[in-house]
Image (tube, grey):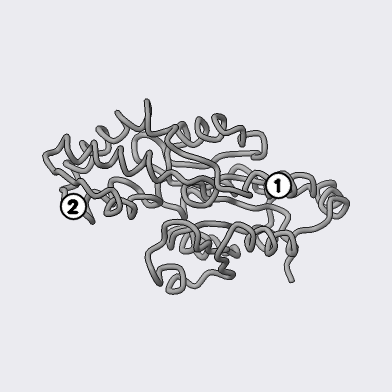
């Protein structure tokens, strides 16, 4: 059984529920480019992956049209959608327990860093994390493999065999596999049916409670973690 000394958390659908903010902002962007979508449930696949890819995949936009749509999305999201979001029940308590054990916590998200930091600060979660790795507003570093790699670039002392990724989409699992770290797939987020199973996470849990049980069983006690940090 591995003792994980550092944990990377995805943001949307893993730490918080961003459904209203994201889907309403996507709806707004689609309307701006001439597409009316009244069913917000059809827009939940936009939660997780890079927006420019989703606009092309789900609504057939060209790359240039998708870039325009992303601009409209951010127009609404940055002023309103950002705060149509809530921490998932039990997450704050889990983060507190992990910090008390001396586990190092990071955020790895495809969301632009500037928005991720605002969301974490708004919900008083920012102080739990050493570093937030996300995409840039120009669309670079949106791939989850690159997002995770950026954490290791900034914290080269982290040991992959003692690092765990937690996420709700196949992109989180694929990124973790590419970076050779273990990964938990969480069913309570926004994965499509069968998506996580096909991506083959190291572990899979259904609820935040199951996630807490799993992680706490695989993390060192406070004294052990602190000793590891001193070495």
- Number of other residues with Cα within 10 Å of mark 1, as a class: few under 14, some 14 to 19, many 20 or more: many
Q: Is residue 52 above or below residue 201?
A: above
Res 125 → quadrant: top right
Please give the label number shown on residue 178: none
**Which residue is labeled 1 in the image?**
104
Counting residues from the start of the chain, the first of labels 1 and 2 encountered is: 2
Please give the label number shown on residue 59: 2
Residue closest to the eye, 132 or 28? 28
Q: Residue pushed farthest left?
A: 34
x then y, percent, for residue 195:
40, 68
Q: Is residue 140 left or right of residue 108?
A: left
- Please name the residue shown 30% across and 53% down the image: 41
Q: Distance between the residues labelled 1 and 2?
A: 39 Å
- Please name the residue shown 73% across and 63% down the image: 218
Q: Is residue 159 left or right of residue 33?
A: right
x then y, percent, for residue 156:
65, 48
x then y, percent, for residue 203:
59, 69
Residue closest to the eye, 38 or 66? 38
1 or 2: mark nearer the eye = 2
Give SS at disc 1.
strand
x then y, percent, for residue 148:
53, 51
Give SS at disc 2.
helix
């Amino acid at each position: 059984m591995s003792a994980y000394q550092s944990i990377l958390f995805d943001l949307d659908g893993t730490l918080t529920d961003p459904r209203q903010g994201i889907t309403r902002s996507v709806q707004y962007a689609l309307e701006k480019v001439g597409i009316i979508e009244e069913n917000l449930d059809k827009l939940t696949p936009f939660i997780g992956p890079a927006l420019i890819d989703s606009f092309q995949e789900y609504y057939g936009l060209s790359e240039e049209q998708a870039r325009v749509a992303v601009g409209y999305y951010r127009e609404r999201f940055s002023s309103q959608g950002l705060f149509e979001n809530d921490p998932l029940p039990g997450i704050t308590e889990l983060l507190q327990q992990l910090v008390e054990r001396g586990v190092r916590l990071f955020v790895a998200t495809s969301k632009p860093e500037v928005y991720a930091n605002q969301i974490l600060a708004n919900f008083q979660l920012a102080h739990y994390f050493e570093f937030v790795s996300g995409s840039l507003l120009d669309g670079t570093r949106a791939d989850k493999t690159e997002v995770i790699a950026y954490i290791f670039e900034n914290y080269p002392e982290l040991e992959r065999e003692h690092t765990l990724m937690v996420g709700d989409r196949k992109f989180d699992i694929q990124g973790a596999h590419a970076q050779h770290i273990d990964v938990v797939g969480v069913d309570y987020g926004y994965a499509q049916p069968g998506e996580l199973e096909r991506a083959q996470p190291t572990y899979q849990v259904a609820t935040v409670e199951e996630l807490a049980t799993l992680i706490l069983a695989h993390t060192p006690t406070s004294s052990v973690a602190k000793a590891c940090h001193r070495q």
